[in-house]
Each structure stands twice: as structure tokens, then as C-alpha cells.
Image (cartoon, grey):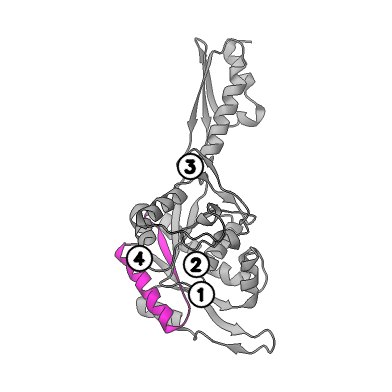
């Protein structure tokens, strides 16, 4: 067997499908491999395995591995609100899960640096984040969604007292992590229009923004401010979502509207942005969220609320991509 044939034969069968070419000359084996869809860590592992396998061949003094990969066309959607307490994080989680169920490769970035909640919502509270050098490796949740959050990097319950530059640096680490073949990042922004929002809009150029509000006037005023910020940054508004829209009493079955009714849809019309749908104020959603079981992962009563909003987002992403 020639030395070049021996090099080819030494490549493990499970890796041979990734190898595009091999060459051997003057003791140097050169291997070109396709690493498309692999993250940095997986790509480095592929390189090591090829070097070890081929390096054992008699006559091979050096192994050079060239990894080729198609650049992932990754879209970014931010989920924002003008004020806290309107269910923005819960919507982010469930949109990601609903899209993952439809086959989308989705990641969630918990950009609410001071009040991270995605680890709880996605059931990854006890999962520690790994790193390769300075690059973070996202955690894979049990719902087909990758996630990165400051809540996984600091001690539970510990306050984060950082100024703007540190917050911007933390956001960049989360966004620039090894997301591998993830096609879509959904970013859970903190409430308001501060440093994190400005860093995100200026540095990472989202494809669109989903804005969440309750029907009450106070929340809608703040949601309008968020929409204005996105428009100033020339980020397209995917649409408005009305959360906590009506409460069905589990005891008597009566429906009430503690936060008002239809205000978000009316605001969407007046602001000339799409209305994406409503999510009710329901005990089942609260309990499922607190226990890391997103309703969108099921076809039970409340899953379809999120699936419908996710379908609007998927259509938007299709128009942007196309």
C-alpha cells in the first residue's frame, strides 16, 4: 500500500464522510475536511482526531488539517418591552421552543444581565457553562433550544452591580459564543431602552424586534418608547404581542380582564405595526414556566397561543431571508 493510500485508510470511518481530500508528500500528510455546521469546539475535536489517526501512520512526520466550512447565515430577533413584568422572558422562551418544534435551529441569549431568567424557564438552572479558551459554549436545553445566560455564570441570587461597559462586554461574550449551526438567535432584552439595547442594536444589527405589552395604558406607553428606539435604529418591528390578556378563574370559570382588554391590538393599529396575537393570564402558564416546562413544548391548552405567534415570526424571517 502506498503512503498516500495508507493515510486515507487510517481515517476513521465515522470521519471519512467529512474528508474532502488527502495528500502525502515528504513526510507531510495534508487533509482537507468539511466542518460545516460544527462549532469551534467540535471543529477542534475533528482536527485532533484526524491528526491522531493519521499521525500514527508509518512515515508520517507531520499532519496538517485544513477545515472548510460554509458560513452560517444566522438571524437575530430581539424581544423587548418598555417596562418589566409584562412576560417578555416567558414569550422569548416559548417562541424559541415553538420554532424548534418546527425544525428551526434556535438559540436563546438571555441579555437581561441584571435579572436573568432563561435558565429557570428552560430548565437549565443546574447546568454550568463550558468555555473553550475565551469562547463560551451554549447549554443544550431539553427542548431543542440552546441557551446562554448570566444566570448560568454567577452564583444564584447574587446581585450584578456592573456599569455600562462591563454589561456591553458581557453581552458580546454571550452573542459571540460558539453557537455552531444555530440559524436563529432570539435575544431576551432587559426592559427599557438602556446600555444593553444600544449595544445590541449598534453592534449586532437584529433582523427584527418583537415587542411585548400588557393591555393597560401604562405598559403601552412604555412599549411605544421601545418601538420608537427600534425604529430609530432602523430595526424592523415584527409586531406587538398582548400578554396577560384575560383571566379565566379556575374556580368559577368567569373571565375577567385585570389589565384591560384589546389595548395592545389597538396600539398596534395606531402605530402601524402588525399585531401578532394574545397570551392569556393563566395559572398553568405560570406554573409551567416556574418549573422549566415551557407550554410551547406541548399541544395542551396554552401551547397553541405561542405557536401562533411563532408562525408569524417564521413568516417574517422568511421574507427577510428571501
On the rendered image, what quadrant is the N terminus found in?
Answer: top right
Instruction: Give me the C-alpha separation between circle 4 and circle 1.
Output: 20 Å
Q: Which mark is residue 135?
A: 3
Q: Which residue is mark 2?
A: 312
Instruction: Determine the residue located farthest toward the left in the rendered image.
Output: 232
Instruction: Give me the C-alpha separation between circle 3 and circle 4.
Output: 29 Å
Give, as a single range, the part of the protein colored magenta. 205-234
Q: Quadrant of residue 117?
A: bottom right
Q: Which residue is mark 4?
A: 230
Q: Quadrant of residue 221?
A: bottom left
Mark nearer the N terminus (3 vs 2): 3
- CB-based contact (under 8 Å), mark 1 and mark 2: yes
Instruction: Give me the C-alpha separation between circle 3 and circle 1.
Output: 37 Å
The structure residue drawn at horizontal position 59% and vertical position 20%, both measured from the top left corner, is: 54
Number of the front mark, 3 or 2: 3
Q: Position of residue 252 (x, y in %)?
A: 68, 89
Number of the front mark, 1 or 2: 1
Q: Which residue is mark 1?
A: 277
Q: Is residue 74 visible?
A: no
- CB-based contact (under 8 Å), mark 3 and mark 2: no
Residue 214 part of the magenta-drawn span? yes
Mark nearer the N terminus (3 vs 4): 3
Q: Position of residue 99 (x, y in %)?
A: 56, 60
Element under label 2?
A: helix
Instruction: Give me the C-alpha separation between circle 1 and circle 2.
Output: 9 Å
Q: Does residue 236 appear to the left or right of 145 in the view shown? A: left
Mark nearer the N terminus (4 vs 2): 4
Number of the front mark, 4 or 1: 4
Number of the front mark, 4 or 2: 4
- CB-based contact (under 8 Å), mark 4 and mark 2: no
Question: Height in image: 319 above or below 24?
Answer: below
Number of the front mark, 3 or 4: 3
Amino acid at each position: 500500500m502506498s503512503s498516500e493510500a495508507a493515510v486515507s485508510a487510517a481515517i476513521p470511518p465515522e470521519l471519512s464522510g467529512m474528508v474532502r481530500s488527502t495528500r502525502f508528500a515528504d513526510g507531510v500528510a495534508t487533509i482537507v475536511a468539511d466542518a460545516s455546521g460544527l462549532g469551534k469546539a467540535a471543529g477542534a475535536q475533528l482536527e485532533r482526531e484526524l491528526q491522531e489517526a493519521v499521525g500514527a501512520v508509518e512515515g508520517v512526520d507531520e499532519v496538517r488539517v485544513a477545515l472548510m466550512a460554509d458560513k452560517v447565515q444566522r438571524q437575530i430577533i430581539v424581544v423587548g418591552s418598555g417596562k418589566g413584568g409584562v412576560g417578555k422572558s416567558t414569550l422569548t422562551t416559548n417562541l424559541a421552543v415553538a420554532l424548534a418544534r418546527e425544525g428551526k435551529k434556535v438559540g436563546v441569549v438571555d441579555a437581561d444581565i441584571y435579572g436573568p431568567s432563561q435558565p429557570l424557564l428552560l430548565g437549565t438552572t443546574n447546568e454550568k457553562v463550558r468555555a473553550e479558551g475565551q469562547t463560551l459554549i451554549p447549554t443544550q436545553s431539553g427542548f431543542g433550544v440552546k441557551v446562554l445566560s448570566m444566570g448560568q455564570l454567577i452564583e444564584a441570587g447574587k446581585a450584578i452591580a456592573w456599569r455600562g461597559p462591563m454589561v456591553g462586554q458581557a453581552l458580546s461574550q454571550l452573542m459571540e459564543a460558539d453557537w455552531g449551526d444555530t440559524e436563529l438567535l432570539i435575544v431576551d432584552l432587559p426592559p427599557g431602552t438602556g446600555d444593553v439595547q444600544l449595544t445590541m442594536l449598534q453592534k449586532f444589527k437584529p433582523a427584527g424586534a418583537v415587542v411585548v405589552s400588557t393591555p393597560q395604558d401604562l405598559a403601552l406607553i412604555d412599549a411605544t418608547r421601545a418601538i420608537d428606539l427600534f425604529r430609530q435604529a432602523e430595526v424592523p418591528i415584527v409586531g406587538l404581542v398582548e400578554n396577560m390578556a384575560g383571566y379565566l378563574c379556575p374556580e368559577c370559570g368567569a373571565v375577567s380582564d385585570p389589565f384591560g382588554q384589546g389595548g395592545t391590538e389597538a396600539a398596534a393599529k395606531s402605530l402601524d405595526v402588525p399585531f401578532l396575537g394574545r397570551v392569556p393570564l393563566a395559572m398553568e402558564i405560570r406554573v409551567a414556566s416556574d418549573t422549566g416546562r415551557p407550554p410551547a413544548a406541548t399541544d395542551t391548552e396554552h401551547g397553541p397561543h405561542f405557536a401562533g405567534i411563532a408562525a408569524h415570526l417564521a413568516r417574517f424571517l422568511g421574507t427577510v431571508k428571501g
